[in-house]
Amino acid sequence: MQINRIEFLKEMEEEKLLRESIRRVISAVKQRKKTKLKERQSDERYLRMIVRQLLKEAETADVDPSPGKTTGINVLEDLLKRIIPVLQDDYKILTTDEQQRESFRAHILNAVMKTLKPIEVSNTAGEAGDGEEEFIDIMEIIDVEIGDEEKFIDIEDDETPEEKEALSPQEEFGTGVGGHDLTGRNMAFTTYKKIQSNIIDAYELLENDEDRNIFEDYLITNIKLYFDKFEAELTPSLEEPTTPEYEEAAEEEIPTEEAPEEELEGGAELGL
């Protein structure tokens, strides 16, 4: 009895120690899980902070941080951002027929070239001179003797200003572009007044010959390309894309116009 009691107490003590060991292990595992959870939460908070920072930088970043190859291209790009929306809105108003839009396009392009050409000539003349004005006697150039009536060419206009037919602003604007729709011309006249000063201001910023040439060439080219884009948006192609697989499947799904004889006989029996 005494031995059994000692063994029993010993077993109780061992079981107690075992239970304490298990508790310590469980506690250590729980603590480790808590530590890992905190580390994971800390990592997630860190990642969220990075993502928020990146989003904030993206919102405040320059939409076009990389400049073009030349100053002329950079100035032109800035100009196009201001004038193309104006051209687009007014071009797409002309929906009665295509001739109106063709007239609008031709008059705008002609007006741009007429605007830039005098500025280009003026700048070229200013660079060629030494700053001193030269008086050119036209009579010396043509070597005409006033007394010789046969050789004398009268350059005076016989018509008085009152006798001349005054052109309207729209007609003056359309000079050099004949045979086009007048509605398109009038709309182009109104539109060009909105963008003319922008074009002049941008071009006059440039003093380098290369920049001027690039600006002028690419301005005309881009306006024409944008007109092509606007026209394509107004008159989209009616043919939608397809694939051989679709065509094959569509043919299988299309029912024949005449039903098989068996179906007709069955229908007759049913009273259809």
Image (cartoon, helix red, strand yellow):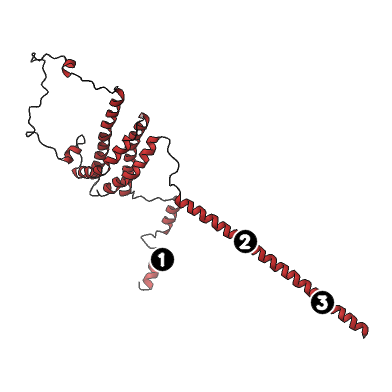
Answer above or below: position of 186 versus 164: below
Q: Separation of disc 3 and disc 1 at Cα?
A: 88 Å
Q: What residue is disc 2 on?
A: 40
Residue 215 vertical position relative to residue 138 in the rendered view, above or below: below
> On the image, which quarter does residue 149 sit in?
top left
Quick one: 201 or 2, which is closer to the camera?
Answer: 201
For this rendering, which residue is in front, 28 or 189?
28
On screen, residue 265 versus residue 26, left or right, reads: left
Q: Quadrant of the N terminus?
A: bottom right
Contact, mark 3 vs mark 1 (Cβ under 8 Å): no
SS for callout 2: helix
For the point 25% across and 36% down, which residue is it?
A: 110
Q: Which quadrant of the rendered structure holds the C terminus? A: bottom left
Helix or strand or loop: what does disc 1 sit on? helix
Residue 174: % across, % down: 20, 38
Please tell me which residue is depicted at 30% across the width and 38% down the height of the picture.
201
Total label count? 3
Give the residue number, with chain letter if any, for mark 3. Answer: 15
Q: How far, Cα to Cα, is label 2 from label 1?
A: 72 Å
Q: Is residue 249 left or right of residue 185?
A: right
**Which residue is denoted by mark 1 in the rendering?**
262
SS for tag 3?
helix
Residue 36 location, quadrant: bottom right
Q: Is residue 212 left or right of residue 137?
A: right
Q: Earlier in the sequence, mark 2 or mark 1?
A: 2
Q: CA distance from mark 3 to mark 2?
A: 37 Å
Circle nearer the N terminus (3, 2): 3
